[in-house]
Amino acid sequence: MKAAVMRGIRDVRIEDIPVPPVLDEEALVRIRSVGVCGSDIHYYTHGKIGRYVVQPPFLLGHECAGEVVEVGAAVRNVKPGDLVAVEPGVPCRRCRFCREGRYNLCPDVVFLATPPVDGAFAEYIAHTADFLFPLDGVSLHEGAMCEPLSTGMQAVRRSGLRMGDTVFIAGVGPIGLCALQAFLAGGAAAVYVSDLDADRCRRAVALGATQAFDASDSELAAKLRDLTHGRGPDIVVETAGSEKATAQSVQIVRAGGIVVLIGLSPAAIIPIDTIAIIDKEIDIRGVFRYANTYPAALSMIRRGTVDVKSMITAEYPLDRAKQALDDVAARKPGVIKAMVVNG
């Protein structure tokens, strides 16, 4: 089969590799849609994220959907011909985290495109069938978007959102736009956003943001206080991986509020005002992937509660996967979510 193989930093080549074998609990999926994620860009441009280091040859891509073409002997939930969304992480299902339902924290999870596990920039993958979800009227592109939407949904859970809360999201790339819609669906009274890209700000407003700000505005914190009766937002979500926005989050959030960190910063250690955290009794919560979200994500897309289709602004065939990565890494104007397609 054809695959886009990462051979080094910014070095991706189309090569022939073997079709993977299918185990009893797996299905062979012909990949049709793969979104380019921020983590793909980190691996492509830096070769690592924290302790996860790329050892070439390596396949990127984990936001994916496709068609089941073969199933193992023990598979009952899908059949050949089914169109499915692929949840990319398969946990052990035995450890304490798995038993508690927080399988995103499983230390033995096998996650597509997280070294040393290959991803889905290929014609086929073999995947545990329990983590395949029939689309049932949802398009392939939308099925692939279940992955970033799930991250937005996990941010809502981790934030402890209450009906009527006000939210501020720093960064409205794909994850930020998904988080925006998830918070609105969860009952937020107002969601304010910021970004350096004016087009992304306009798109956020079109998707329901109460107001969008230029992230470089030196008066941003003061403006958000004015809009929230002098208190500040109840919840601040950082999705861009910006050191400045992360440090600023504890200044923006109200006393007793919650800061949720999603974005991956190139710097693992960021100076932050610990006095403000203590004085305002702020909770800071991380978001690491998601758990038990795909059925709900598909339902929200199917019912029109969220709009992920409009976020897909560029398509590339598999043999141009490198161009897709380059365009996203360069933040090419107009590119929000790039999708690599196969057939």
Image (cartoon, rainbow, N blue to C red):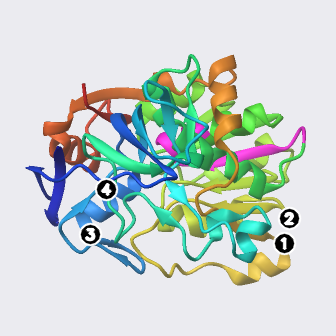
Residue picked out by circle 4: 41
Q: Which circle marks residue 280 in the picture? A: 1
Q: Which circle marks residue 233 in the picture? A: none
Q: Residue at x 45, y 50 (%)?
A: 127
Question: Which range of residues does the magenta coloring cover?
Answer: 163-178
Q: Is residue 124 visible?
A: yes
Measured along the vertical axis of the image, is residue 24 above or below residue 333?
below
Neighbor class of circle 3 (other Cα within 10 Å; few <14, some 14-19, many 20+) is some
Amino acid found under the numbered disc labelled 2? Ala
Q: Nearer the viewer, mark 1 or mark 3?
A: 3
Q: Is residue 214 magenta?
A: no
Question: How far is the residue under mark 4 from the one under mark 1?
Answer: 35 Å
Asked if residue 58 lies left or right of residue 303, the reply is left
Helix, strand or loop status at disc 1: loop
Q: Residue at x 66, y 79 (%)?
A: 273
Amino acid found under the numbered disc labelled 3? His
Front residue (pair 274, 262):
262
- Disc 2 + disc 1, Cβ < 8 Å: yes
Question: How far is the residue under mark 4 from the one under mark 2?
Answer: 35 Å
Q: Residue at x 63, y 30 (%)?
A: 298
Front residue (pair 258, 222):
258
Q: Residue at x 53, y 27 (%)?
A: 308
Mark with earlier residue (1, 3):
3
Neighbor class of circle 4 (other Cα within 10 Å; few <14, some 14-19, many 20+) is many
Question: How far is the residue under mark 2 from the one under mark 1?
Answer: 4 Å
User: Residue 53 appears at what percent x and percent y?
Assistant: 32, 76
Amino acid found under the numbered disc labelled 4? Ile
Residue located farthest toward the front when viewing the structure as drawn: 73
Q: Nearer the viewer, mark 2 or mark 3?
A: 3
Q: Which circle marks residue 46 in the picture? A: 3
